[in-house]
Amino acid sequence: MACIWYDVQAWIGGTCVYLMIRSIWNDWRTEVPGEGGIKNGIQIRAQTPSIHKIRHLFTVKAYFVPTAGVAFFIWAIVRGKGIGPIVHQPGSKQGSELGWLMVRGIMSAIANFDTFIVNDPDFARFARKPSDALLPQLLTIPIGFAVTSFIGIIASSLSDYQLYQPS
């Protein structure tokens, strides 16, 4: 299952990179000769090392990704001259409609990190005892996803706001 999910994430990430490159260079070629073989070879090679051999990559990522996320968040706020219209607009839903939207949002958030919940034994196997994995996951999964979602919502609000503002 992890290999399939890795391929899905690689396809989504590759599409995002493709769109970023196309937005910079519109005439960028859409097909690369032998692309499938190269891509699959890189993916298979990336999946073969054991976790102990690439642990330093995760250490670097643990410092780089949060720093880049906070820098992006600050950049978006400075560029947008504030936190954007989503925070300032009044709510338009009330009553049961608001309640069901809240339930839908909670379920959507849980669905976003259910892979981590299902794969709990994979994380717990490196712990000395099973309860050692409980507190870190109990705190980091909801807090990490909440912070990441907040940054994404504010940045999306600012980008949408900037697109439709007169120059």
Image (tube, rainbow, N blue to C red):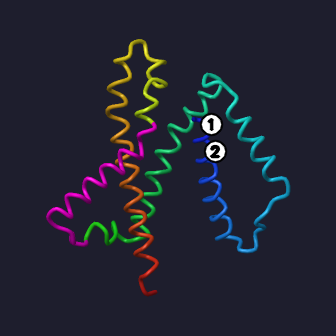
Q: CA distance from mark 2 to mark 1?
A: 6 Å
Task: Residue 95: give x, y in percent of width and height.
Answer: 14, 64
Residue 7: mark: 2
Tell me the SS state at disc 1.
Answer: helix
Figure check: 55 above or below 21: above
Magenta stretch mostly in which secondary structure? helix
Tell me the SS state at disc 2.
Answer: helix
- Residue that lies at the very extreme toward the left in this rendered image: 95
Please rate how many residues cluster around mark 2, counting C-alpha atoms within 10 Å: few if below 14, some from 14 to 19, many from 20.
some
On-image quarter of the N terminus: top right
24 on left or right of 60: right
16 on left or right of 48: left
Q: Residue at x 80, y 53 (%)?
A: 35
> In terms of depth relative to the viewer, which is nearer, 6 or 144?
6
> In terms of depth relative to the viewer, which is nearer, 150 or 114?
114
Q: Are marks 2 and 1 in contact (CB under 8 Å)?
A: yes
Task: Residue 71: give x, y in percent of width and height.
Answer: 46, 54
Task: Residue 83: give x, y in percent of width and height.
Answer: 33, 66
What range is drawn magenta here? 89-115
Q: Residue at x 79, y 63 (%)?
A: 31
Residue 3: mark: 1
Is 104 inside the magenta-drawn segment? yes
Residue 88: mark: none
Figure check: 66 above or below 59: below
- Residue that lies at the very extreme toward the top in this rendered image: 128
Task: Residue 92: give x, y in percent of width and height.
Answer: 21, 72
Label 1 amino acid?
Cys
Figure check: 41 above or below 103: above
Q: Residue at x 74, y 35 (%)?
A: 45
Is 132 inside the magenta-drawn segment? no
